[in-house]
Image: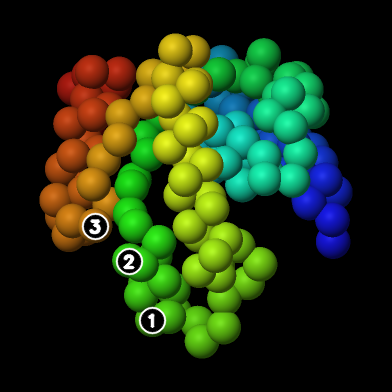
Amino acid sequence: MQEQALALLYAADRLDHVTQPNDGLLSQMARGVAVVCDRYYLSSLAYHTHAVSAGWIEDINRLAIDAALPDLTLFLEITPEVALVRLRKRVEQGERYEREAVLRAVHAAYDEVLARESLRHRVVRLDGVRSVDEVSVAVLSAVSGLVGRAL
């Protein structure tokens, strides 16, 4: 499948995820629910801008972005080498985005995206190589100001 088609599919899924009347992000937030999701708009920029422009990615995601921009983005940073080791523990052969060359390109793209988008997005970079317990503590620390004592 062409990268442009995949980018469109992700954008459509994101919009659906945001606007579903019963359980979408907007309806959940309207009920006072703290919403946590993985891989939002910045992921599309990192994964797809090697094939299409960042402006196009932004355009196709505009409705979702305008409807629900995150209060906080946590970026769990790991090297492509660590990602490959972790992937190999789960699967023998990775999928399209789980190959070394792609992981290296996406890693570099995230550096560019986070530097550029940090003016519009509150991004906290966390060391994802650390243990699960250490990462959990770092995540709780990063979000504690948003949700107060609810945690």
Q: Which image quarter holds the C terminus?
A: top left
Q: Position of residue 110 (x, y in %)?
A: 48, 40
Disc 1 target residue: 89
Q: Is residue 22 visible?
A: no
Q: Position of residue 119 (x, y in %)?
A: 44, 12
Q: Is residue 60 visible?
A: yes
Give the quadrant of residue 58.
top right
Disc 2 target residue: 82
Residue positioned 36% across, 35% down in the render: 74
Q: Is residue 75 above or below residue 98?
A: above
Q: The residue under label 3 is which amino acid type?
A: Val
Q: Which mark is residue 129?
A: 3
Q: Position of residue 113 (x, y in %)?
A: 51, 31
Label 2 close to label 1 by CB (< 8 Å)? no
Label 3 close to label 2 by CB (< 8 Å)? yes
Q: Is residue 57 above or below residue 6?
A: above
Report the side of 151 relative to 60 (left or right): left
Q: Which image quarter holds the N terminus?
A: bottom right
Q: Position of residue 13 (x, y in %)?
A: 74, 41
Considering every residue shown, the one lying at the far bottom of the view is 92
Measured in 3D between alpha carbons, the distance from the residue under mark 3 to the one under mark 2, in whole angstroms, is 7 Å
